[in-house]
């Protein structure tokens, strides 16, 4: 057996080790069959909920676009699956308004599905702004508060008048996501609130405001020198911007404690959580949370608990931040307060004085905390670690750790069932629910639900998220900065003064004659660089801002050099990692028209005019599109520093996420939502400011400014590779019907081939699926179709028809959920399971429910099956052999008639 310290165990295998260590073994779901699959790795916000009466547990099934419903039992197996309800694309939160009305927030569909739990169907769909995240109910006249992350606002709906337009509350903060309420106040965590760091531009660092003698750039980080020391023989390091952090006295300091306040004439607002009066809708802001608050919850006495990660990006150079650059934290906001009263490290055993500890100590760490819930008495809290696949219990009085429990892969949501002394976690990557005894903090069971995620995703995810296998302390991973494969919206200086110069070996200046040596070699002191997204990497090599990584495999060393792991990622692991990242899609660009065309107005610019300028406006020595080639907006060429008027050469970056970088303004006295903006170091506040650089040839005066606005508007509308309509929904009939006009828009888009149109319609106790193809709707029964007119005729109050546009190639799953080649209606009619690719119509020996075999491993129906059926008497599930939703004498008769060796 290999030494444990040298074994890198992926998330998919880690539960086995943890189970053996804790004396239990949990059965997890088998990998789903590969099929046409598009996903966005949307972040879970509040993915698990219990109805107020405690009778049912509700879990979002994000990649399957469904809500899973479980009956809560007082004894083993603790949960019984009661059904699945189709909602919008990428559901990330679920809340119960009462025991029967459930609201599900669909992140990519930009909608909320409102479910009638008694009929197990969607009764209404409301359309929200871009990328909604969470919902809570509050106020004396109960209202629904929905966080809309991309628009930095809260939308307030009257749940009794869904057709009424919402009240909009604009927030001073980037990406409000998680919500909590005490009934009178609504708290909204600002996911990208930052940590009071910002970037001083290179030209300012090199000026007389530099507090060091001689105005050095780069300035020292250890007294008057550098730590680690600069390697002998290296050339002079390039000038660069500098990251500074505001201290408690409001002074901007670098990691060497020098005062740079004279250089920072702007401010960051430090708004970490919005506090909304549920009656007046007035907004105040709480301060003092961690860099990225991911989950919040109320205590019984009105305090707010927050969990998330704290980044130490003000520290310079990779050897100095190795393994210690991020911390998992909890914070408490006092009832009615606006300043955090306490913050604590969820890993009190870590000192951060070393970058590596023994493996078994790493397994004690909590990484990437996402969900939190208070105990019934408000003395302790429980938080989930997405990256560490565990939950931690900690004191709310002093932050002390009280317990730790390993659960399924990638836990996000957490719910307390105080009546039964149980905790439930939704395990995002394991597609399961873990049941944990609150008193002993031990996992009692793990219940799987259907998951269409293909193997390539399952195999690669641990390389991004798993903090135990990837880091020396067990609390960090690639996802610590590349949150959900995206960005932390910070800049980091990860150079190494003691490193070596790397010889330039890429294409320089588009290969123009005489430019081969213009780009220069890559210095190990790179300066501050903004975190880049990991989405859309395929075909955009070389990587990094400077293009100094020829391919993805060259990041393997980051496992040891940055994360502090024992060994670099292997070539096999890097291939798994890269293949996984290639499956993640950018979400649709909300700044485009629904049919994918450019608008003629966005802000103060015209994106359509901007496209013309981008492709043929002669704004540079070549057209913009010459370097920023379509469709990604990037290219493999490196542009020399002299052409860019920059100290270093830079790669031409892709442009598909420009809309994510807004919110920074470095003009005098400006107060910002964040401290970083555009370009390689985040020092350029806006695209308009970028286009003011002298390298561009815009018209003079007001005409030039309008051109800058137009090109900026185009870049904010850049095609992400996912059609703008994907996820869009329309409802015919029912409450808050948004009508035929929008439905017809969706149909026209499907006819044009830009996306596929699916529909769902309640029919008795089930929902029937439809897929539009060649002028009619294929049903979930083979060989049958219906028409648009027939669906319209069936739509009525209490029986709405919901239409959704899905990515091309994925529509078939609307009528064949598990991709086994048999349509869902046919499977239901023949008593096979539409959510199990191994269960198909006509399969023999359904009565072999215990899975026993006889001689020669031949399946057999025997006493074990009879015992399982009798144990399930009066319920539903696998023992319901005739599919009438009830285990009774008819099922017993089927079993007895099947007794013996299966045919």
Image: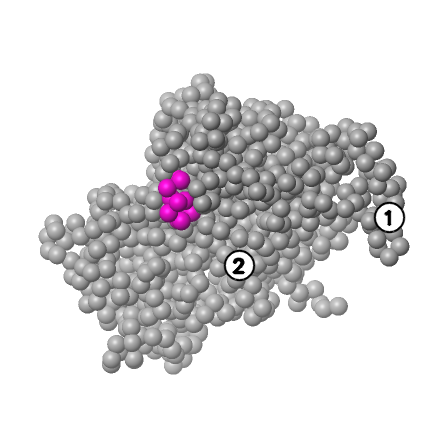
Spot occupied by residue 76 in the image (x, y as percentages of width and height): 76, 36
Instruction: Answer few, some or many: residues within 10 Å of disc 2's Cα (few below 14, many 20 plus, some between 14 and 19).
Output: many
Upstream in sequence: badge 2 or badge 1: 2
In the orientation shown, which residue stands out farthest toward the top? 140
Residue 539: image x %, image y %? 42, 65
Q: Secondary structure at mark 1?
A: strand
Furthest residue toward left = 701
- Name the dominant secondary structure of the magenta segment: helix
Q: Which residues are magenta?
A: 746-755
Kindly indicate the quadrant of the structure image that contains residue 864.
top right
From the image, state whether disc 2 or disc 1 is nearer to you. Answer: 1
Q: Is residue 81 on the magenta stretch?
A: no
Q: Which residue is mark 2?
A: 580
**In the rendered image, which quarter contains the N terminus?**
bottom right
Q: Which residue is mark 1?
A: 901
Q: Is residue 513 visible?
A: yes
Residue at (40, 49) in percent of width and height:
753
Residue 312 figure quarter: bottom left
Residue at 40%, 37% in the rendered image: 148
């Amino acid at each position: 057996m290999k030494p444990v310290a040298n074994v890198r165990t992926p998330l998919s295998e880690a539960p086995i080790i943890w189970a053996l260590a804790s004396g239990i073994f949990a059965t997890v779901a088998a990998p789903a069959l590969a099929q046409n699959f598009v996903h966005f790795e949307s972040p879970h916000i509040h993915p698990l909920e219990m109805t107020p009466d405690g009778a049912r547990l509700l879990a979002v099934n994000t990649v399957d676009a469904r809500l899973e419903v479980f009956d809560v039992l007082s004894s083993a197996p603790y949960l019984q699956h009661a059904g699945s309800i189709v909602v919008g694309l990428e559901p990330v939160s679920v809340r119960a308004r009462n025991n029967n009305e459930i609201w599900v927030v669909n992140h990519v569909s930009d909608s909320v599905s409102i479910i009638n739990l008694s009929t197990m169907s969607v009764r209404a769909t409301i359309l929200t702004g871009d990328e909604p995240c969470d919902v809570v109910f509050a106020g004396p006249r109960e209202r629904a508060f929905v966080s809309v992350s991309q628009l930095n606002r809260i939308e307030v709906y009257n749940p009794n008048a869904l057709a009424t337009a919402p009240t909009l509350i604009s927030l001073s903060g980037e990406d409000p996501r998680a919500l909590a309420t005490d009934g009178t106040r609504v708290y909204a965590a600002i996911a990208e609130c930052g940590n009071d760091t910002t970037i001083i531009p290179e030209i300012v660092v090199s000026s007389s405001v530099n507090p060091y003698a001689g105005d050095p750039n780069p300035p020292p980080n250890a007294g008057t020198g550098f730590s680690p020391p600069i390697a002998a023989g290296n050339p002079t390091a390039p000038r660069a911007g500098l990251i500074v952090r505001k201290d408690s006295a409001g002074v901007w300091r670098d990691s060497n404690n020098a005062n740079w306040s004279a250089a920072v004439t702007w401010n960051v607002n430090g708004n970490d959580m919005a506090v909304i009066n549920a009656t007046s809708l007035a907004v105040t802001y709480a301060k003092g949370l961690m860099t990225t608050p991911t989950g919040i919850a109320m205590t019984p006495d009105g305090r707010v608990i927050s969990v998330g990660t704290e980044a130490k990006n003000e520290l310079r150079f990779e050897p100095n931040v190795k393994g210690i650059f991020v911390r998992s934290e909890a914070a408490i906001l006092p009832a009615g307060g606006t300043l955090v009263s306490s913050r604590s490290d969820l890993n009190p055993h870590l000192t951060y004085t070393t970058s590596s500890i023994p493996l078994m100590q790493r397994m004690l760490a909590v990484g990437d905390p996402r969900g939190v819930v208070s105990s019934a008495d408000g003395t302790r809290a429980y938080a989930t670690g997405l990256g560490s696949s565990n939950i931690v219990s900690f004191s709310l009085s002093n932050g002390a750790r009280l317990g730790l429990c390993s659960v399924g892969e990638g836990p996000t949501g957490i719910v307390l069932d105080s009546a039964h002394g149980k905790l439930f976690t939704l395990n995002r990557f394991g597609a399961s629910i873990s049941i944990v005894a609150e008193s002993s903090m031990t996992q009692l069971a793990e219940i799987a639900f259907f998951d269409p995620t293909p193997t390539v995703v399952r195999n690669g995810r641990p390389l991004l998220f798993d903090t135990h296998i990837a880091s020396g302390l067990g609390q960090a991973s690639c996802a610590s900065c590349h949150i959900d494969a995206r960005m932390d919206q910070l800049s980091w200086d990860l150079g190494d003064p003691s490193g070596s110069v790397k010889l330039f070996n890429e294409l320089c200046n588009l290969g123009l004659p005489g430019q081969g040596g213009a780009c220069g070699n890559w210095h190990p002191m790179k300066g501050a660089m903004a975190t880049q997204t990991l989405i859309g990497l395929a075909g955009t090599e070389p990587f990094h801002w400077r293009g100094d990584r020829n391919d993805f495999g060259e990041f393997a060393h980051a496992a040891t050099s940055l994360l502090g792991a024992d060994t670099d990622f292997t070539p096999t692991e890097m291939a798994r990692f890269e293949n996984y990242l290639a499956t993640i899609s950018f979400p649709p660009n909300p700044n485009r028209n629904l049919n994918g065309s450019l608008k003629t107005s966005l802000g103060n610019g015209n994106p359509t005019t901007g496209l013309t300028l981008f492709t043929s406006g002669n704004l540079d020595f070549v057209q913009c599109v010459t370097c920023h080639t379509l469709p990604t907006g990037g290219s493999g060429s490196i542009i020399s520093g002299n052409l860019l008027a920059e100290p270093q050469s830079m790669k031409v970056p892709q442009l598909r996420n420009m809309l994510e970088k807004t919110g920074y303004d470095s003009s005098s006295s400006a107060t910002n939502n964040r401290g970083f903006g555009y370009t390689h170091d985040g020092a350029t506040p806006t695209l308009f400011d970028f286009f003011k650089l002298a390298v561009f040839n815009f018209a003079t005066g007001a005409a030039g400014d309008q051109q800058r606005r137009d090109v900026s508007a185009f870049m904010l509308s850049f095609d992400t590779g996912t059609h703008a309509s994907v996820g869009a929904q329309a409802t015919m009939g029912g409450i808050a019907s948004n009508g035929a006009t929008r439905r017809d828009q969706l149909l026209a888009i499907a006819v044009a081939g830009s996306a596929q149109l699916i529909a769902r319609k309640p029919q008795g106790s089930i929902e029937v699926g439809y897929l539009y193809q060649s002028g009619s709707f294929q049903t979930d029964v083979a060989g049958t179709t219906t028409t648009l007119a027939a669906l319209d005729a069936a739509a009525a109050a209490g029986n709405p028809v919901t239409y959704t546009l899905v990515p091309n190639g994925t529509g078939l799953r609307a009528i064949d959920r598990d991709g086994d080649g048999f349509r869902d209606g046919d499977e239901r009619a023949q008593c096979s399971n539409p959510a199990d690719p191994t269960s198909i119509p006509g399969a023999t020996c359904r009565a072999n429910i215990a899975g026993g075999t006889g001689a020669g491993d031949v399946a057999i129906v025997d006493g074990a099956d009879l015992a399982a059926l009798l144990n399930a008497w009066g319920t539903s599930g696998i023992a319901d052999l005739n599919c009438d939703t009830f285990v009774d004498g008819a099922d017993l008769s089927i079993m007895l008639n099947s007794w013996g060796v299966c045919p």
